[in-house]
Amino acid sequence: MRQAVVLASLLALIGPAALASNTANQTVTFQVSAINEVSVSGNPATLTVSAATAGSEPTEVTDTSTTYNITTNGTNKKLTGAIDTAMPSNVTLKANLAAPTGGTSAGDVSLSATAQNLVTGITQKAESAKAIAYKLGATVAAGVVSSATRTVTLTVTDG
Amino acid sequence: MGTGVGTATAWAHPAATQNGSREAGGDSVRRHGLVGLTLGAVVVTLVLPIGAVDAAVNIVAVGGWSRLVNASDLIAGAGSDLVSVYESAANATLITITGGGNNTWRVDVRRTDSIWNGGFHLFVRRTGDGTGSKPVTGGLAYQEVTTTNVSLFSFEGNRSSIPIQYKLEGMSIAVPPLTYSTTVVFTVVQM
């Protein structure tokens, strides 16, 4: 008989405690898209090759007036560069981009219509005002070249 | 945890249930009286709470929150990080509690993660009272939602359409692109 009373009391306590609560659920969802953004501060000044040291090829000229900004939430991304039209024969346009923290700059890279790696190993970075250097060079074989414009396209892509 | 609803119902029908048990097992009771009494008492407590479910309080939550985070959420475009704090609409969820009788109740909140980021902090608050004849107290300031229950607000009786707002902190460019989801569980308990 004592056993019966104990069992009844325990169950009576458990039952009401469960009944006195009820639940309702809501779902909170965040969809984070792949973000790969790059921008530049502006256009560099006109690069003009106009001087040479006697006995040497014409002197290369450099512009460091522009910078770039990059944001990516991806891993192992790279920054490539390409120009819209190939350079004239014996004329070279190079780009040298400083790397975001943790990335690796490729140094001076001759640009062409085919995308070239400028910076690699970029992972989840948001950095701004990274240095860009454009360098224009020509050999005497280029002769006199008319002024022209090239559009450089920087792209964040998978590394 | 409350005991009011269960206790009142539990002692309302013991005689009827005990009688029913004895009728079903009458011969056994006569031969083994002590055993019969034991089984009878167990059946009473198992059966009665089932009847009490209908009278229990009920909570319903309608809505939820879904947010797409993309490049438009960068603070200042390329070179900048993502906005770190996001808020839902003030009435992203509407909570209704019925069957509360004249009792005082508390709504607790917790979350159960599906895919979640360790850097996220989810908060919840109520932005209004909803409708009901008696006051609601607490819950007007953001309360962090963790994986264990915390008290959000309390009230007496019934309440409908209490508006709930969510806030997420901790978004950054270091959060890998993915769909993150957690279930926010609102639990009503008697005080």
Image: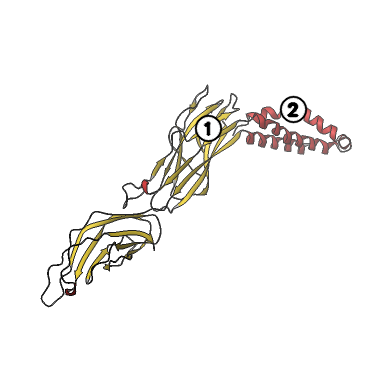
Give residue B41's position: percent from left, percent from top.
Answer: 77, 35
The C terminus of chain B lies in quadrant: top right
Q: Amino acid at mark 2?
A: His
Q: In the image shown, does B36 or B156 lie closer to the viewer?
A: B156
Local SS, label 1: strand
Q: Nearer the viewer, mark 1 or mark 2?
A: 1
Q: In the image shown, does B131 or B123 lie closer to the viewer?
A: B131
Residue B127 badge: none
Give residue B105's position: percent from left, percent from top.
Answer: 55, 30
- Chain letter of disc 1 in the image: B
Q: In the visual, does B7 lie left or right of A159? A: right
Vertical side of B15 occupied by B82: above or below: below
Residue B95 badge: 1
Vertical side of B84 occupied by B103: above or below: above
User: Dot 2 corresponds to which residue?
Assistant: B13
The N terminus of chain B lies in quadrant: top right
Q: CA distance from mark 1 to mark 2?
A: 33 Å
- Give the class, few, some or many, for how many residues have Cα within 10 Å of label 2's Cα (few <14, many ≥20): some
Q: Residue furthest bottom?
A: A55
Local SS, label 2: loop
Q: Residue at x 20, y 66 (%)?
A: A136
